[in-house]
Image: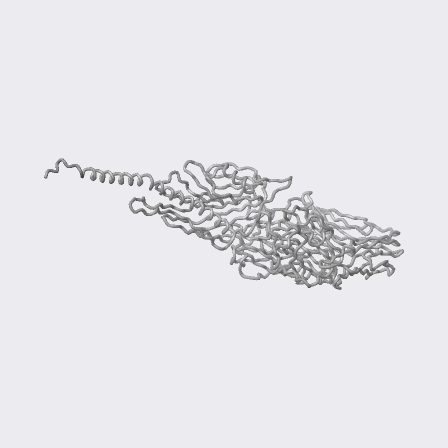
């Protein structure tokens, strides 16, 4: 059979060959185009995932910088392509995550008013820091960026020079400067996930108030590969209202200068520094400087009395160091000291009990590096303690006792949080005391603001930042600030001068022997958030230092630490609060209306008033309508010299509970003549800060006198180089012919010290004396 002419099988064979060729070509095209495109999408999605992970990593680093717990994060170093049966993938993508030294973050042209902290600041601060960078090795994706975290910012850095930010910044927010430093050595390469544990080696728990110095405005120099324009854009969107300028400087750095003034007032910035470690070779900061907390120097105590002094050891990032040993010494035998513990506690603090052994002045000095004490160095700190002899009080004694009644309450603001604190102090001595100033220091340093947040009101307790109730008359300090502003509470406490601080105030209240004064402080805030957080003060610990003056002129102070209890549950009656508008003055033979209508009851109403005369040297004064809120006081027809008559008000609330308050009515001798009072400055002792020549304080002794025996008040003015640095006013009743001593603050000024003392009698006649330190 002849098959040479048979073509029936040719079509099938050719078709099979062609079909196989088409399949091969299609698979080749798929391998060459589709597979790379799909794998490029895998790489792109991985890159986007890394961006998200870096934003989370940034948050972990920033959050860990102010707390003790570690914050773990994960970054996917590489990725694998989906498996393919018939097609070929390149090898898996790998990447490298590692730290890189970028230079030092510096703050320059700064100074602080905190005495010991100024040794630490010393014109400027500089800290080495690092970035954390991820570089992928993609097979297909072109022009991929290096993803970077540095100085609170996450961004992408491209080889073209373009940078795209992935987050905002938290370096500067309003008047808060928060440095977050990164240190350690970290390097990981591969395909899997890398775990990074961000652990604070120095949590940012302390804040330093800083201003610009004589060299210029506060300036932050940031080591960065972002440009000044990119930083300017970041700052404009994230609270950079106080930024004055942003400029590029040499060496991949950007300089940020802050404003010096706002509305004509110097701007104070809150500086916080936190250091975070990653990987190995992490810095373990040691003790760097020593400072004094819970009130500043100088301190005054009587012979045989004690005072607790609190020192704090901090590292180079300005945060507390626990377990540090501190050596203490007293420069004079007038004071003996006893540390309360061998090392610093978890807050970096160590307390020393100073006992006044004899009259004199001594510096209590602490040092953590050796037993060579030099208060001018950062390793050492000192508190000046003046011990007075008992003679100045003419046998009288005075002291304040905490009545163990601190309670957290809500004020008259629009919130319901018990953010205020009330407490009482009793005068357990035999002399009256004049309350001069109060230092209020919450132990939790995040509580850094005070505001009553009440618009208008009657300036009653809960409607002012400080209100003091005392039998002689109330006192208040109110700061006229907006709803979004706060009075700054520094780490060493808010110092309030009762008759000078704030925008609305009054005179210093007097607390007699056996009497009590109640303090109302409203309300505390954590200002770290955008609008601040009203702090529930229930269970919070506070230290309160109250400075007072005795009738002899001796100034003393007591410090109390206590926990604020919860406010009483419903059903517990709060006593009424009596208030009078005295003290009063009336000429002999005249009359005056007394006023107790301002009395109130926080949980009810006043149901009755009762006035009575408790001390009348003439025996001839009387009251009309003593059961009314506003009775009339009738003065005797004639007195020999001015006479003080004590009147007591008793109020009763709707639950039957009563409270009393006394006031004074001075009956003036209108017929008498009288001589003007006199005063002589007898001594001026100047205390300087080390060998700097700066005046720390001056102790002034003077002798007032009045032939008529009716001295009333005295005021001392201290000037250094012609500038008034401090004043002190106090009662001189009964101080004729005695030596009165007063200590005033020199404010670290330099120059000749000059003192003026003015005295006034009951007829407002005055006498004065002025001398400088060379004339006594």
Q: Nearer the viewer, residue 373 or 7?
A: 7
Residue 551 visible in the shown view: no
Quarter of the image for residue 359 reads bottom right
Question: Is residue 763 shown to the viewer in this render?
Answer: yes
Question: Is residue 322 left or right of 452 when viewed as pictured?
Answer: left
What residue is shown at x 32% (from left), y 45% (from top)?
91
Indicate the colouring scheme. one colour
Give the residue displayed 61% in from the left and 56% down from the top. 536
State left or right for residue 139 relative to residue 703. Answer: left
Q: Quadrant of the N terminus?
A: top left
Q: Position of residue 219 (x, y in %)?
A: 54, 41
- Residues 130 and 398: in front is 130
Residue 123 appears at what percent x and percent y?
55, 44
Q: Residue 170: where, in percent of width, then height? A: 52, 45
> Residue 314: x, y in percent?
53, 53
Compared across the picture, whether 554 is left or right of 371 comes to right
Q: Residue furthest right?
A: 637
Determine the residue positioned at 65% across, 50% down: 451
**Foreground pick, 646 / 678:** 646
User: Quick check: 453 above or below 165?
Assistant: below
Q: How many marks?
A: 0
For the residue pair 338 and 8, the one nearer the viewer reads as 8
Residue 550 appears in which quarter of the rendering?
bottom right
Q: Residue furthest left?
A: 1
Q: Is residue 248 above or below residue 609?
A: above
């Amino acid at each position: 059979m002849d098959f040479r002419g048979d073509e029936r099988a040719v079509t099938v064979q050719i078709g099979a060959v062609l079909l196989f060729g088409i399949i091969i070509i299609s698979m080749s095209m798929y391998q060459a185009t589709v597979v790379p495109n799909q794998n490029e999408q895998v790489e792109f999605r991985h890159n986007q995932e890394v961006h998200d992970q870096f934003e989370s990593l940034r948050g972990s680093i920033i959050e860990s910088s102010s707390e003790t717990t570690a914050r773990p994060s994960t970054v996917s170093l590489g990725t694998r392509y989906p498996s393919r049966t018939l097609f070929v993938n390149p090898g898996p993508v790998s990447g490298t995550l590692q730290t890189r030294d970028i230079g030092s973050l510096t703050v320059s042209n700064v100074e602080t008013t905190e005495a010991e902290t100024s040794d630490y600041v010393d014109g400027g601060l500089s800290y080495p820091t690092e970035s954390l960078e991820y570089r992928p090795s993609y097979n297909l994706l072109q022009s991929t960026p290096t993803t970077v975290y540095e100085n609170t910012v996450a961004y992408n850095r491209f080889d073209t020079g373009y940078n795209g930010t992935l987050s905002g910044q938290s370096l500067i927010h309003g008047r808060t400067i928060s440095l977050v430093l990164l240190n350690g050595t970290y390097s990981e390469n591969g395909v899997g996930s890398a775990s990074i544990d961000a652990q604070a080696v120095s949590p940012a728990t302390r804040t330093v108030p800083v201003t610009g110095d004589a060299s210029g405005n506060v300036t932050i120099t940031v080591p960065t590969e972002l440009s000044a324009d990119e930083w300017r854009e970041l700052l404009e969107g994230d609270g950079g209202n106080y930024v004055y300028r942003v400029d590029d400087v040499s060496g991949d750095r950007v300089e940020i200068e802050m404003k010096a003034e706002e509305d004509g007032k110097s701007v104070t910035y809150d500086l916080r520094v936190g250091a975070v470690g990653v990987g190995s070779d992490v810095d373990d900061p040691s003790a760097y400087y020593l400072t004094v907390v819970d009130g500043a120097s100088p301190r005054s105590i009587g012979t045989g009395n004690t005072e607790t002094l609190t020192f704090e050891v901090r590292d180079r990032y300005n945060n507390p160091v626990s377990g540090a040993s501190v050596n203490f010494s007293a420069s004079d035998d007038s004071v003996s000291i006893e540390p309360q513990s061998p090392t610093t506690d978890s807050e970096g603090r160590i307390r020393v009990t100073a006992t006044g052994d004899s009259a004199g002045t001594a510096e209590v000095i602490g040092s953590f590096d050796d037993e060579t004490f030099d208060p001018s160095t950062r390793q050492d700190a000192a508190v000046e303690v003046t011990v007075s002899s008992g003679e100045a009080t003419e046998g009288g004694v005075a002291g304040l006792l905490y009545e163990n009644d601190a309670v957290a309450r809500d004020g008259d603001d629009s919130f319901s949080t018990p953010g205020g604190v009330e407490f009482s102090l009793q005068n357990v001595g035999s002399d009256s005391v004049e309350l001069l100033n109060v230092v209020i220091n919450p132990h939790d340093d995040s509580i850094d603001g005070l505001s009553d947040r009440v618009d208008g009101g009657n300036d009653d307790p809960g409607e002012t930042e400080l209100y003091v109730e005392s039998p002689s008359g109330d006192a208040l300090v109110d700061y006229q600030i907006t709803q979004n502003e706060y009075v700054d509470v520094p780490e060493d406490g808010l110092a309030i001068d009762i008759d000078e601080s704030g925008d609305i105030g009054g005179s210093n209240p007097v607390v007699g022997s056996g009497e009590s004064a109640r303090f109302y402080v409203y309300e505390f805030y954590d200002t770290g958030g955008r609008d601040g957080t009203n702090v529930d003060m229930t269970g919070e610990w506070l230290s309160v230092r109250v400075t007072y003056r005795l009738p002899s002129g001796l100034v003393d102070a007591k410090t109390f630490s206590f926990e604020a209890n919860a406010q009483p549950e419903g059903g517990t009656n709060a006593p009424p609060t009596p208030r009078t508008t005295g003290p009063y003055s009336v000429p002999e033979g005249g009359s005056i209306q007394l006023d107790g209508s301002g009395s109130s009851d926080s949980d009810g109403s006043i149901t009755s008033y009762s006035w009575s005369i408790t001390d009348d040297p003439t025996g001839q004064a009387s009251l009309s309508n003593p059961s009314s809120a506003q009775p009339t006081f009738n003065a005797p027809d004639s007195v020999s010299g001015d006479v003080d008559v004590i009147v007591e008000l008793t109020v009763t609330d709707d639950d039957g509970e009563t409270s009393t308050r006394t006031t004074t009515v001075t009956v003036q001798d209108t017929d008498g003549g009288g001589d003007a009072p006199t005063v002589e400055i007898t001594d001026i002792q100047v205390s300087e800060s080390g060998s700097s020549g700066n005046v720390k304080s001056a102790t002034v002794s003077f002798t007032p006198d009045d032939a008529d025996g009716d001295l009333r008040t005295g005021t001392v003015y201290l000037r250094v180089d012609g500038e008034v640095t401090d004043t002190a006013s106090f009662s001189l009743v009964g101080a004729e012919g005695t030596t009165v001593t007063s200590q005033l603050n020199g404010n670290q000024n330099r120059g000749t010290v000059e003192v003026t003392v003015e005295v006034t009698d009951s007829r407002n006649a005055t006498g004065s004396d002025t001398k400088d330190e060379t004339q006594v």
